[in-house]
Image (tube, helix red, strand yellow):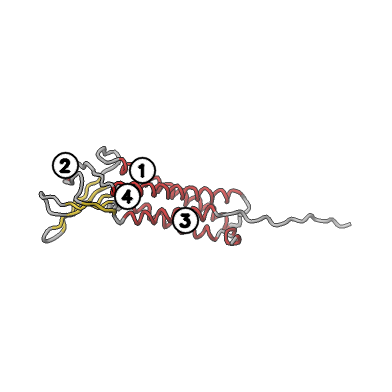
Amino acid sequence: MPLLINSANCQIVGFVVATIGWILGSTSMGFVEWRVWYLDNASQSPGLACMGMWRVCVFHQTNITTATSCHSYSYRDTYLPLDIRVSQNLLLMASILGLLGKASVIFALKNVSMGILETTTTYKAFVISGILNIAAGICISVAVTWNYHSVMTEEGIVFPPSFNIPFKPHAQKIGNTVIVACLAAFALFLSGWFFLSYKLPLDSPVFPEVSGI
């Protein structure tokens, strides 16, 4: 096991896992199924609203097809609840931290491939990447937990009248995007552990030279 850690094989696996986690975390920002609201209003046909961090899409089932309308928003929109506005920034921060972590581990793996193992620069690069990936995982985890709490407590959102979405739905549930975000957070945590597990190779013993008499 020490040989496996010292040879940086764990860090190569960690780089792959970190890449997967970063991709999942970044793409989850664009998905709309963080929350699913079931709408059952007398003024319109039954449907559902899928809410993401940056937009909401409404689906109304008709006799022939499903009508869809999407509305975008940003953290500047004051009608958004605090959890969505904070989660927007957390997910953006996670994407940036994950990208910086990838850059750091690429630098460290480059040193390893060139045989530069004994310097503390390589070790510090792995540690920095591990910290950045774990921090990115924490950001995603906070966003997921806050979103879960908002759904479980059935919190409402005061959307503009033009969105034609009620303050509270008939029922709501966690969307499938949360699964993607959870996988991203897990992958980032795991990759961070891989990077932090790197250890400098043991120094080989040096014997003093004996000059001939």
Upstream in sequence: badge 4 or badge 3: 4
Q: CA distance from mark 3 to mark 1?
A: 23 Å
Residue at 49% across / 53% down in the picture?
192
Upstream in sequence: badge 4 or badge 2: 4
Upstream in sequence: badge 3 or badge 1: 1
Contact (CB < 8 A) between labels 4 and 3? no
In front: 55, or 137? 137
Q: CA distance from mark 4 to mark 3?
A: 22 Å
Q: Which residue is mark 2?
A: 161
Disc 3, SS: helix
Q: Tell me the kind of residue under disc 1.
A: Asn
Upstream in sequence: badge 1 or badge 2: 1
Q: Which residue is mark 1?
A: 89
Q: Which residue is mark 4?
A: 148
| 64 lies above or below 152 | below
Residue at 17% across / 54% down in the picture?
47
Q: Tell me the kind of residue under disc 2.
A: Pro
Contact (CB < 8 A) between labels 4 and 2? no
- Answer few, some or many: residues within 10 Å of disc 2's Cα (few below 14, many 20 plus, some between 14 and 19): few
Residue 139 percent coordinates (x, y): 40, 46
Q: Residue furthest right?
A: 213
Q: CA distance from mark 1 to mark 4?
A: 17 Å
Residue at 10% across / 50% down in the picture?
42
Q: Tell me the kind of residue under disc 3.
A: Leu
| Rendered image: mark on residue 16 | none
Residue 55 percent coordinates (x, y): 26, 48
Contact (CB < 8 A) between labels 3 and 2? no
| Rendered image: mark on residue 190 | 3
